[in-house]
Amino acid sequence: MSLRLEQVTKRFGNVTAVDHLTLSIPEGEMFGFLGANGAGKTTTFRMILGLLEPTSGAVQWNDEAITYAKSHLIGYLPEERGLYPKLKVREQLIYLGRLRGLDKQTIIQEMEKWLDRFKVPEYAEKRVEELSKGNQQKIQFIAAILHQPKLLILDEPFSGLDPVNVELLKEAVLDLKNNGATIVFSSHRMEHVEELCEYLCIMHRGKPVVHGALKEIKRSFGKKNIIIHADFPLDELRHFPGVMKAKQTAEGIHLQVENEDVSQHILAHIADKGFIRKFALEEPSLNDIFIEKVGAAYE
Amino acid sequence: MNKFWIVLWHTYITKLKSKSFIITTAITSLLILGVTNITHIIDFFNKNEKKTIAVMDQTEEMYKPLKAQLEKRGDKKISLEFFQGSEKAAKQKVESGQWEAFLKIAYDDKQLPEAVYYAKTVADSDTSDQVKEALQQIKTAMATAKIGLKQEQITQLYEPVSFQKIALEENAKTEEELNQARGLVYVLVFAMYMFVLMYGSMIASEVSTEKSSRIMEILISSVPPVQQMFGKIIGVALLSLTQFLVLFAIGFSSLKSSGKELLQLLGFEHLPVSTLVYAVVLFLLGYFLYATLFAVLGSMVSRAEEVQQVVMPVTMLVIAAFLIAMFGLNAPETSFITVTSFIPFFTPMIMLLRIGMLNIPFWEVALSLVLLIGTIVLFAFLGSKIYRGGVLMYGKSTSLKDMKKALELTKK
């Protein structure tokens, strides 16, 4: 059950929101979709869901187009949170669940299971407008996954949640993935994507600037980070050959270097200068890659 | 179950259970009970209300005949009191509320009575008219007596002329039938006007609430927008039918038990079946036409507060149709009415008026229905496209240009 986007382009008048995007997401994968605001993430999701027609190109799931006949297999959490403010959580979930093809009995069972899991069983009889924004989001998340979708699209699922709830939701998302669901999600938070996804795509102005497996992306990025904590001044390293960027911290310095070799030269250079409390060579963070790729595209 | 039915049922049940629906239905029922029993209610409040009118009779011979005349008329609410004293004292008593009014009668230069009626306000013309009429009769009697006419001659003089209207066309309605038809048509047109406006704007605000609460994206990702739009329109139609049936049952039974005359006046005594059948058909078609427009307009705004503004043009159309129908009640045969009855926006009300009041050939009705249905199909088709794009558009969007934009959104 793989999801494929083939040269998908969407134009609104003169604006090209998505420009020849080709993606392939294997079944059971968690796919991270990154991009600055307005990069075309939501438009892509809407095309996957069939809410918008691509100007050209095709979206296929299992070699078939996605239509309303398949809506019981698809779950969607939109970026803009919304539920009926006046309806009780129970009525709300029953309505949305039935629209996804479930019967009432199953919905109530599933709802109770999930409300318990999210530690809010007492919300079933509350009206949505009485709940806090974060709790509304949990309800909406439940609405998106109640029918155990095979394809789950989450647009910014963790925004606006406190760390405890982010963990609860992350676990839930991972469980769904382990049950075989294909999950596409977008986020501004690089650490979430780094933690959850093996595959990702960074969008910029409708085009994918980085695309592939996380490990591959990091390896091919080449650049590494060095963290040094020492008792002597390290500022001179700023101008050391091979250093791309440097950032002074309270305890020492963070460097971005061209490649691994540079780290050995630096280590040799500072080894006899004094006491070194920490010297670490790290993979670049997704954050670095994002800033570099998207930032470069801005310039 | 088909998703269309789920949307329909959900719309119907949640609206039916909502407090606002129950309260409006209850209040309207009370109102209908009140209107149908209005004569009883007025009688009840006026039972003990006796109005005293002081009479200062400067002619010294008018008081007694006036009192006799009023009693003859059988009005027990007005009682006269003979008053001798200063005008000022009398006026004070009126102002203090002891007397309803104070009547000063004198002779004019032709030796005929003239009167001045003093009351706190002259808003209650009912009482003063009674007195005036009684006085008028006395004056007539006096004036005719002066000329020397006999009683029979006077009766002859005042007897109304016999004037009968007979329609020669075979199926044309008689005068009486026409009056009854007018009552029936008035009630039906008014009901249509009320329901279209009430439920139309309910649909518009429903759609915009779903949009502003942003639940729309979830909904249209699981139900095709067209099914959703029509599920909603028909759900609300069922709701309006439910309310209509409740109100109709209450009104009809209440009229049957208490307001026979009103029932007759409105032509409900012998309901013409064909008019009713056409009424139901036109009612439904009119509702669908306007409901579709309201739904589409509702899908264009992103905040519930903007709904009233954006549905204004359609509301105006409904009001225009109603006003034309009101004009047509007294002139159903004018060519203006004939022409407007073929304009789809006006057909539901104006054609109903013509069917109810005239005998029009079937082909005219059929033609107008075809035009109306065609328009509905066209708007439903266009509307569902605009709706599909409109629900995805946010921001200030109230113009035709934005409708075009919404249409484009659904294209490739």
Image: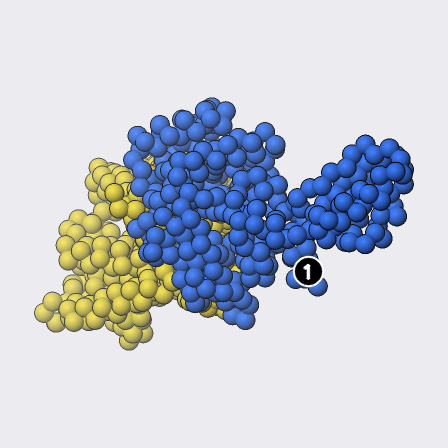
Please state the horizontal and vertical placement of residue B42, each as a whole percent of the image: 36, 38
Q: Which chain is blue?
A: A
Chain where mark 1 sits: A
Q: What amino acid is labelled 1 in the image?
A: Ala
In the rendered image, which quarter is residue B31 located in?
Answer: top left
Q: Please tell me which residue is depicted at 61% across the width and 53% down the height of the picture.
A: A220
Left or right: B304, with A278 as reference point: left
Q: Residues within 10 Å of mark 1 (few under 14, many from 20)?
A: few
- Which residue position holds label 1? A296
Please state the horizontal and vertical placement of residue B333, each as a whole percent of the image: 25, 71
Q: Secondary structure at mark 1?
A: helix
Please state the total of marks drawn on the protein image: 1
Q: Is residue B185 above or below residue B38?
A: below
Q: Please tell me which residue is depicted at 43% across the width and 58% down the height of the picture.
A: A5
Q: Is residue A244 above or below residue A133?
A: below
Please state the horizontal and vertical placement of residue A54, each as a whole percent of the image: 43, 63
**Residue B336 in sight here:** yes
In the rendered image, which quarter is residue B111 located in?
Answer: bottom left
Q: Quadrant of the C terminus of chain B?
A: bottom left
Please state the horizontal and vertical placement of residue B81, each as a whole percent of the image: 44, 37
Q: Which chain is yellow?
A: B
Query: Which color scheme is applied?
Result: by chain
Q: From the viewer's side, name the closer residue of B187 and A110.
A: A110
Q: Quadrant of the N terminus of chain B?
A: top left
Q: Please tell me which residue is depicted at 68% across the width and 55% down the height of the picture.
A: A292
Left or right: A78, with A245 as reference point: left
Q: From the viewer's side, name the closer residue of B393 and B79.
A: B393
Left or right: B150, with A121 as reference point: left
